[in-house]
Image (cartoon, rainbow, N blue to C red):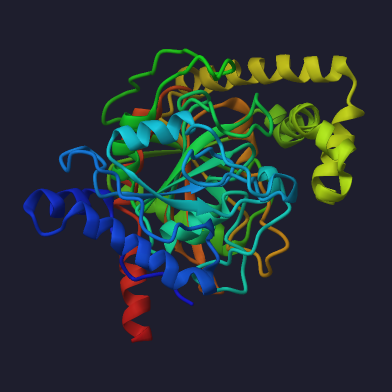
Amino acid sequence: MNAPSHSTNISQIRSDIASGELTVEQSVRRSFDAAHASQAALQAFVHLPDTPAVNAANPAAPLAGVAVAVKDIIDTADMPTEFNSRAYKGRRPERDAWVVARLRAAGASILGKTVTTEFAWRHPGPTVNPWNPEHTPGGSSSGSAAAVAAGIVPLALGTQTQGSVIRPAAYCGVVGFKPSYGTIARTGVLPLAWSLDHVGLFTTNVADAVHVLGLVSGTDAGDPHALNAEPSAGRPGARRIGVLSKQVGGAIDEAQQLALDRLAARLASEGAEIVEVDLDAELAEAANHALTLMAVEAAVTHGDLAERSPDLVSVAMRSLVEEGRNVPATLYAQTRQLQLRMARRFNRWLTETMGLDALLVAPATGEAPRGLDYTGDASFCAPWTLLGVPAVTVPAGFGPAGLPLGAQLVGAAHGDAALLSLAQWVEARTEWKALVKTRFAAAN
């Protein structure tokens, strides 16, 4: 199996519909047919309707004709939302999640529900990597990343509590965007850890992520944990980028480091200022802090089910719940305080002390691991999730096994627009398109 040599995108769909070359129905049907045709091999979806659910909105609506795949922990009123859990088999929400309602209001058509790990935590589903079915697509937003990478849909929704948007996007060779904490309201999204959960986007290019973010960002009274901070304008056109002398998640593969080094050199040759920096030592423990918060909060959300019906809950989730119940209340409170202090310190360091517009970091150790039982190491994403800062990964090359490698950009809290603007500039300077074209020319 190979991912497509080209993928449709939102901009092209909207252009084709505006010109009359394509109708809304034809566009959605194309995604619908692709989803059904690929399902046996890819297993990206846990639910696909028998007929496409075409949104009857005005064809001039900003997402008319755009089919969207939705991670199966995000409620949809017209489709099941089962969390990849036997305990919730057949569950039908009464209403759409806030973000799904926003998408429908913008004209989007919800194509189907994508595979997630159970409750978005470790116990994987059957989805395979579109580039090689013997490798994981990453998790927990497995099906969403695979559906975009396979060219089925130009947009999919995912969530990230550690690395569940950025890592699968990097593994599958697509754009993954995790906005600042609270940027997209989580009403109707199953929580794993409310102090860490983010709704994120998978697209084929950064411009589409920019377009969609403008339509789905906002707060909702049903998401009491969201922040109401004003967005930061950043520095328009500024390109001062920090690279790490040592990756915060640990050691990375040689191919991943080479991809980052080559990209940094290319950016420097195009006018970016590349600065080697060292992060505060406290960030080395970020993944452990995140796990403490996650364990306690998961125990609150899923503890009753794990105790009442342990046979319906995976060992991974039961272990997380047990770990959370053994965390002292004082440690949890101290960790929450530390999370907020670290976030403030990081933002001051990034923007004031170092004067950086972003960090260029690894999204993972390298290529997607072989096998489907392990979805990869989230340590390279967890610090930015803990801090609540925006992060975006763009495809940057291929590794020795012929699987995609990504490059992650991290910005200041609520500087989402500035980070995405920089990411568009970086995306245009990667070798990705040329490498994909060469790869498929050789294959054919």
* Residue 410 can be seen in this image: no
Q: Nearer the viewer, residue 203 or 25?
A: 25
Dividing the picture into quarters, in which one does residue 211 lie? top left
The count of marks equals 0
Percent of width and height locating residue 310:
88, 45
63 over 45 or under it: above or below: above
245 over 101 or under it: above or below: below
363 with respect to 66 (left or right): right
Q: Nearer the viewer, residue 76 or 432?
A: 76
Percent of width and height locating residue 256:
55, 59
Residue shown at 53%/74% (left/top)? 41
* Residue 137 can be seen in this image: yes
Percent of width and height locating residue 13:
21, 53
Q: Nearer the viewer, residue 293 or 282?
A: 293
Residue shown at 89%/28% (left/top)? 325
206 over 16 or under it: above or below: above
Residue shown at 30%/66% (left/top)? 6
242 over 225 or under it: above or below: below
Percent of width and height locating residue 395:
42, 56
Q: Residue furthest bottom?
A: 444
Q: Quadrant of the C terminus?
A: bottom left
